[in-house]
Image (cartoon, grey):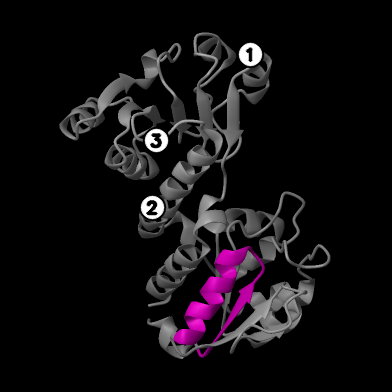
Amino acid sequence: MNVLKSVKTFAVIGGDKRQLFLADALTRDGYSVILGGFDNLVSIGAITLADISTAISYGDAVIFPLPSVRADGSLNTPFADEKYYLSDREQEILSRKSVLAGMADKLLRTYPSLQNGTVYDYAKRNDFAILNAVPTAEGAIARAMTEYEGTIAGSRTMVVGFGRIGKVLARLLKSLNSDVTVCARSAADSAYINALGYKFQNTEKLDGVKNTDIIFNTVPSLIFSEEVLKNTDRNTLIIDLASLPGGVDFEAANALGIDACRALSLPGKCSPKAAGEIIKNTVYTILS
């Protein structure tokens, strides 16, 4: 059933600037939008501002941010004055609506009664992840340009992991005239990496990194352990893009004098407009 046809009003709850651009994109498509969880906004075009409870009540479909909830169970509402927890009444209302959330499993663990309703996780969809890889990769390079004292052109870079983000990131780095090495495991990845003109390094044989200026890690498991870091040049910059707990022993890196940093939620920080459009298009696909 095409649920999207029955939606006239979207409730957009909390989140960062991605949610603001999402709300704006929805209004430009002709939908009414009620924005909740942005307490300090005075006005924002044709978008209706309301408290979270009102937004949930009047929205035909409710869109929560990525991630939807914090570790303490409160909604991810960084622009709200106070932490917000869903009441029993709000949970009951949501169980009768289409709810779309990033990392929805955390939302359902926190508020298990929502399992009786219809909850979609837009962040788990392959189309969302592929499109989101572009702003993530661009944000990673922007971070490198800020942290690295040289230029990307002529630099020696390593991309660890050849998934969605790794593929896009390696391509962008090569287009900027960087000497790119990609770490992966499978023979198929090795063939693909070599065919695209990158150097290949087997992740399972990675016991250190030499002669590399910048490392971008995309693998969410401990790749850069203390032992690996001991065999890594001290002047190498490591940017960890992997979801928590990440792939770098930061305590060991600090002790060894290696510059390592986390770079999370890059689409929301570096490309919120594009990221908001990606969420919108994924929501449309789900509801259609």
What amino acid is labelled 1 in the image? Leu
Q: CA distance from mark 2 to mark 1?
A: 32 Å
Q: Residue at x 60, y 56 (%)?
A: 67
SS label for mark 3: loop
Q: Residue at x 33, y 45 (%)?
A: 168
Q: Is residue 98 above or below residue 234?
A: below
Nearer-the-camera pick, 129 or 100: 129
Q: Which numbered marker is on residue 134?
A: 2
Q: What residue does disc 3 label?
A: 152
Q: What residue does disc 1 label?
A: 256
Q: Residue at x 16, y 32 (%)?
A: 195
Residue 128 at x, y percent in the picture: 40, 59
Q: CA distance from mark 2 to mark 3?
A: 17 Å
* Tag 3 near tag 1, CB within 8 Å: no
- Indicate yes or no whether the magenta region holds residue 117: no
The count of marks equals 3
Nearer-the-camera pick, 199 or 214: 214
Between discs 2 and 3, the one toward the N terminus: 2
Q: Is residue 34 above or below residue 187?
A: below
Name the image quarter holding the N terminus: bottom left
Residue 44 shows up from this direction: yes
Give the magenta-colored segment's residue range. 8-28
Residue 95 shows up from this direction: no
Residue found at the very far front of the displayed protein: 150
